[in-house]
Amino acid sequence: MATVEIGLLVASTVTLGAPLILAALGGLTSERAGVMNIALEGTMLASSCTVAIIGLKSQNPWIALSAGIAVSVCLMMLHAVLTQAFSIDQIISGMAINALSIGGTGLLSKALLNDTDLARSPFLSVTLYWWAAVVAVGWLAFYLKRTKGGLHLLAVGNDPDKSRQMGLEPVKVRYLALMATGLLCGVAGALIVSNSGNFSENMTAGRGYIALAALIIGGWRPIPTLVACLVFGLIQASQLHFQGTQLAGANVPPEFWNALPYLVTLIALAGLLGKSRAPAGLGKP
Amino acid sequence: MNGLSWKHIALVLGAFAVVVLAIQTTGVAPATAAKSLLEGSMGGPAAWRQTLREMTPLVMAGLAVFIALRAGLFNIGADGQLVMGSITAAVVAQSIPGVGGVILGSLAAMLAGALWAFPAGWIKAYRGGHEVISTIMLNNVAGFLTTWMVAGPLRDVKQQSPTTRLLPPGSSLPNLIDSPPFKVSTALLFGVVGVVCLAFWLKKTVAGYELSATGANPIAAETAGVNVKAVTLKAMMASGALAGLAGAFIVLAFEHRFYANFSSGYGFDALGVALLSGGSPLGLVPAAFLFAVISSGTSALQLTGVPKGLSGILLGILIIVFASIKYRRSKLGDS
């Protein structure tokens, strides 16, 4: 393989991996605090749509990014209110938020954007988002291990009852953790729409679930999760690069590469890649 | 109902405001939209036909999710199990013509659905991996697998978009009623019969009782001598079989073929129907009807300029409001 090709492969691995990293870290803050979060997908999508619409109306990419983050944080606060104040099951709440978001973005993008508008939203440079992803991983790895707030978060996720006895307030910690989830998913959604240059319906296309998969394979820890996201990014990138070429004499269909992250996660869940280390208090009230 | 408070009133008001606001952004008056939604789902023969058609697979798919929920499992994987059932039914009914193909196709679809649910059940029972995560993964794999099959080995080359060949006319489920305004497939009857059988099975049989006991409190059930792991695996596979059957119904009664991106979110609808049943199997029928009304109603609303996305908003809000009142977490699993 020529050096140029390797360079291209690395570039597209980073491009495809960065939104996964941001979303997976969002999942990490939520799940380490004990809140199951299958709503990463919908939360990112809502941000993508908002960034496109507000970008078009304001012509200011920073205002658009802030609006995307704000909407994403609102959805995660909804998840927090429903699961903590209303005690709705975390899975049901996550499913409902995904439905709201897919329906809502479908409705708003049709009502407020038309095809000629779509390309006229300004976007921030994607390299800015790459740096955001790198900083987020480093900071989160440090925060969880080395600060009081991080240790409180882990304690709440491991055993909410015991942490309550120790004088912590699990509900308050979870609200803050989900706020961070909203922030990270908002940035991830903004990156996805910036990458493609315009919004299209359901454009996150399962990335929220791949991020969730990376989080599980990474054992709910920042650095291994980063690695898993980059591997998944590489899988997607190689699928684009090697389309049509043969591997070991056979034509590998693109669907196989697309399904690979999910298959690997199933194998990991089956415990064939070592013991799973889910936060002990995941899903507990 | 006790436990209701100002919180719930605020939630309902907020939910109502969101729906009204969403409709308002499209430039259609909310009252007009509500009227066309009802007319589009129940205002005339064509509307009724569409609503009953939408309802048919939802009863069976809702039943699938319901039985898993009774055992304490969230089968988010109904979607994947359903498409695996659909494609299997299409293949079998294609190769065996006539009634035999319909029957064998339905059975094969149940088998396919059960097998697709097996990894999730096994991982949950014997490996402790969360069934929600494994079924999400299986849904995506099923989507890519069927897309590949229908674009490659099973493709009807004469068609422009990836689809299997149309089934011969004799290879479909007959209609139970076919006189205007009603057109009802026998598949709907099977669904309703399935609901009644399940209600009976849960109440009157040991296996049904063990299933409910496992869902209500697995530790207590284990202590009482129930093999919780085996019940978990069996419940997940039974759920997959029923979801597969729902998929067979769609192919054999309505679509007569399988095509790429077959599922329009059946898995989510099935979960919604199971939740809205309120913990009783007989509640599945009205719940499926409500979902069908929203689905066919919002399809009709598109003509007045309200995008189809409204159905996602309505269903999401419906589930949130209902769950906040009925399914507070402490209550899940019992009824």
Image (tube, rainbow, N blue to C red):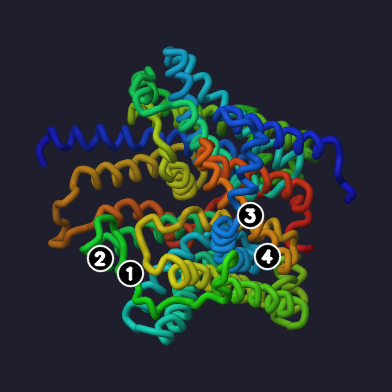
For the question of whether residue B135 can be seen, the reply is yes
Distance from label 2 to label 3 (Cα)?
A: 36 Å
Q: Is residue B286 rendered to the left or right of residue A207?
A: right
Chain-order first, disc 1 or disc 4: 1
Q: Name the residue under label 3.
A: B42
Q: Is residue B282 rendered to the left or right of residue A154?
A: right
Q: Mark 1 points at which residue?
A: B166
Q: What kind of residue is marked 2? A: Asp
Q: Where is residue B70 in the image (x, y as percent from the top left)?
A: 69, 66
Distance from label 4 to label 3 (Cα)?
A: 16 Å
Snapshot quadrant of residue A199: top left
Please give the chain letter of the residue carrying mark 1.
B
Please give the chain letter of the residue carrying mark 3.
B
Snapshot quadrant of residue B223: bottom right
Element under disc 3: helix
Q: Name the residue under label 2.
A: B156
Chain-order first, disc 2 or disc 3: 3
Chain-order first, disc 4 or disc 3: 3
| Residue at the (29%, 52%) spot, across then down | A257
Q: Mark 4 points at which residue?
A: B285
Q: What kind of residue is marked 1? A: Leu
